[in-house]
Image (cartoon, rainbow, N blue to C red):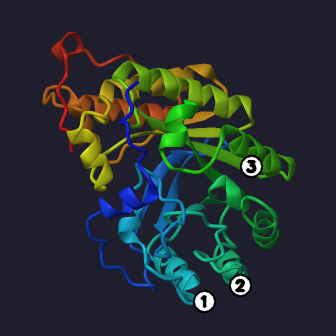
Amino acid sequence: MKFPERIISTDIIISSRIRRNRVQPYEPYAWLIEDERTFSGKVEPVGVIFLTNRECPYKCLMCDLWKNTTTESVPPGAIPQQVKMALEQMPGVRHLKLYNSGSFFDPKAIPPGDYPEIALLAGNLDTVVVESHPHFIGDSCLHFRDLLKPELEVAIGLETVCEPVLKALNKKMSLDDFRRAVKFLSSHGIRTRAFILLRPPFMTEEEGVFWAEKSVDFAFNNGVECCTVIPVRGGNGIMDRLAEEGYFHPPSIKSLEKVLEYGINLGAGRVFADTWDLNLFSSCPHCLEKRKKRINEMNIRQALLPPVLCHCNDEPETLNTM
């Protein structure tokens, strides 16, 4: 594990950024439908809405979600309008993820006064998943849950249980913060899922796999029902600088397979590998599509599948750095 001598502060992270994308406060910046094995065991279509709102106050080292945020809080009523617009494009979905590039329970991002209308729009669904930093977990979660007819689930970024790296990510949370948040939600009947990073900065490939697996263990041991493993990407400014200085390299798609296999084999809960832009994590044109297909099928089946055989398994892999 290798760290730079200087502390990478919030100011350095912000000063390394490129420009934001242009977004509209009354329109989600994206939405999609994806198949997912749900808590019930059924494979069903899930609607995902990427809400446009104020940037998260926590400037995490690896985060690029700020690119699609506003510089000020959106007006009251804007978030329900975004939800309504996207839901009209995805008729028939029974489950919904509301991801807002930060914390749903941050009142400067999602006005609590909008909760009743959001709940009404979600009235015919079975599940609503939102995301939140542990510091925003509290009574507002219970207020929103009580307004909902669907079951509420909260996703929390655990990131890594390697404490020196977690501190260096500038997330401003501890493992105890995560533990307390999950305990609070579980005690009130709210299921949780954890986001876990594969090879964040400062780790070798082997350390990345080791700590991702330990993070899956930690999440399940503390009551999380579902884990999503996210291979870390560059492209947000500071991560590119760290890559140039030798402190960051994207993980291999084979490492993602390994951690997914490990998590599924535990049988402790659902484990998914994030599949966005998997091309970034492989340089082998012969097996990439087969590996992508295998990862997607393991996500859906929650079962191990035969490994992909390729000559690159026995050769060092050189990945795209960005």
State left or right for residue 192 relative to residue 22: right
Write down the quadrant of residue 111 in the picture: bottom right
Q: Residues within 10 Å of mark 3 (few under 14, many from 20)?
A: many
Q: Helix, strand or loop at disc 2?
A: helix
Residue extending furthest front?
5
The label on residue 196 is: none
Q: Which residue shows up at 63% across the image and 45% down it?
A: 193
The label on residue 181 is: 3
Residue that mark 2 sits on? 113
Which dot, 3 or 1, sits closer to the camera? Answer: 3
State the quadrant of the C terminus.
Answer: top left
State the quadrant of the N terminus.
Answer: top left
Give 240 or 193, whichever is nearer the viewer.
Answer: 240
Which is more N-terminal, label 2 or label 3? 2
State left or right for residue 280 relative to residue 4: left
Q: Helix, strand or loop at disc 1?
A: loop
Residue extending furthest right?
187
Residue extending furthest top?
314
Q: Which residue shows up at 49% across the image and 82% down it?
A: 72
Q: At label 2, which amino acid type do we have?
A: Gly
Q: Residues within 10 Å of mark 1 (few under 14, many from 20)?
A: few
Residue 191 location in percent, x, y? Answer: 73, 48
Q: Which residue shows up at 76% across the image and 64% down it?
A: 141
In contact (CB < 8 Å): disc 1 and disc 2: yes
Mark 3–mark 2 Cα distance, whole angstroms, equals: 23 Å
Which is more N-terminal, label 2 or label 1? 1
Q: Helix, strand or loop at disc 3?
A: helix
Residue that mark 1 sits on? 76
Q: At label 1, which amino acid type do we have?
A: Pro
Q: At label 3, which amino acid type do we have?
A: Ala
